[in-house]
Image (cartoon, rainbow, N blue to C red):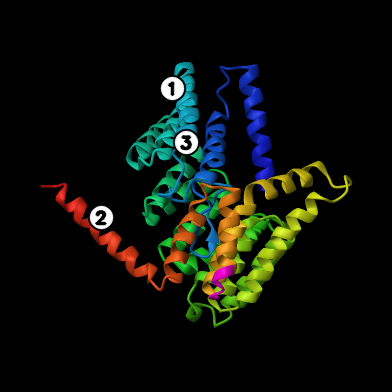
Amino acid sequence: QEMGHILAAEQNYQRVRSLDSHWMEGMDRYAHLLFQLRMSRKNAFVLQQGGFIHYQFSCHAGRDKMDNDAVTCGVEDELGQLAADLLDIDDKKPEPWVCLSLYHLARDDHDKSIAFVDKAISINQQHSYAHYLRGSIFLASHRPDHAVVSFFRANDLQRDIPSYEGLVESYLAAEKFKEAICTAKEAISSAPRDARAITLVGLALSQAPASQQNGEGKERAKRALKRALSLDPGAPRPLFALVDLHASEGNFDACVKLLREAMDGGRNDASESSSASPATMGHTVTWNKEHADVIQSKLAEIYTLSEKYSEALECYHVAISMNPHNGMAVQGLERLEKIMRGVDPDEEMEDEGEVEDEDREQDYY
């Protein structure tokens, strides 16, 4: 449902801009919507650390080397124009500088992105979203301890699920599992029926060492993730986290069942009668349009792990036919083809990394 709300919000912001081109309030949020909607496709829905990394809520996922340059230029052009417009209106407010920060984040320039979000915070230290964005940039820069400070400040100013998500992910990245679990439980106390909050508990429990959970963490994580899916059947993050949990246990049949049900559920929902609410129908359209290639890619990954290579090959080709710029599918297919040729793909990746390191060293001389 969240993605449907995001698309509707973007349309509302566009309507406000068309009515009053000098309107400033909330334009930083509009900039964030532009960023996440465009970059979600560019990032090819990167799967990492047992979860679905924030295509809906933030900019935590790194840019993929298989990305489409046209998508990059699109988001940069939109954000660049919006930042220029806002600076012309009033450069004494934080919104233009937040927008400029997002512009440089889209360009992978984390240093400039931090500099401009710091400028926004210097103008208004109570601007919760600026602190949230600062935490997102630090997390994307692999500086989780710094990210915790910013997310904590954002959450202190405005308690919401995105700042809790940032905190949990930062604690997990820093391997502070106890803090991650406690923060996730606090998020549930704040929003007991929010699927995103319940998902956080599942993610934290799934990644914490068994020694810290009396050996019951994985099962508790599964229950939490299933609960999140029951509240929001179209939520990709708990779906992929649950799939990864089953995969880590070698239960590939359960993984395939979950992913097949997700695909069939989206198609079935789309063909249901008009008795469904507009919000639900909007969510269904978003699911079919935005996630089908990602689910196919994940299904192919599971088939690869279970050594069902022909099924994996078919799923990768389907995913790429749906979205030729799905970096996860393109890279997964390359990896699968190496495996089918009897080549160790991990060993080749290490060799490529060493060559890149040598090239960088030569640049200094």
Q: Tell me, for residue 70, which label it has, or none.
A: 3
Judge whether 274 appears above or below 268 on screen.
above
Alpha carbon distance from label 1 to label 2: 43 Å
Q: Disc 1 vs disc 2: which is toward the camera?
A: 2
Instruction: Check disc 1 and give the amino acid type.
Output: Lys
Q: Specify which label sits upstream in the sequence, 3 or 2.
A: 3
Q: Position of residue 251 (x, y in %)?
A: 60, 78
The range drawn in magenta is 306-310
Q: Which residue carries the number 1 mark?
A: 92
**Is most of the magenta stretch helix, strand or loop?**
loop
Specify whether residue 308 is painted magenta.
yes
- Label 3 neighbourhood size at 10 Å, few (<14), some (14-19), many (20+)? few
Q: Position of residue 275 (x, y in %)?
A: 89, 46
Residue at x-position 41% and y-position 50%: 140
Q: Which residue carries the number 2 mark?
A: 356
Alpha carbon distance from label 3 to label 2: 25 Å
Left-right relation of 287 to 339: right
Instruction: Check disc 2 and give the amino acid type.
Output: Glu
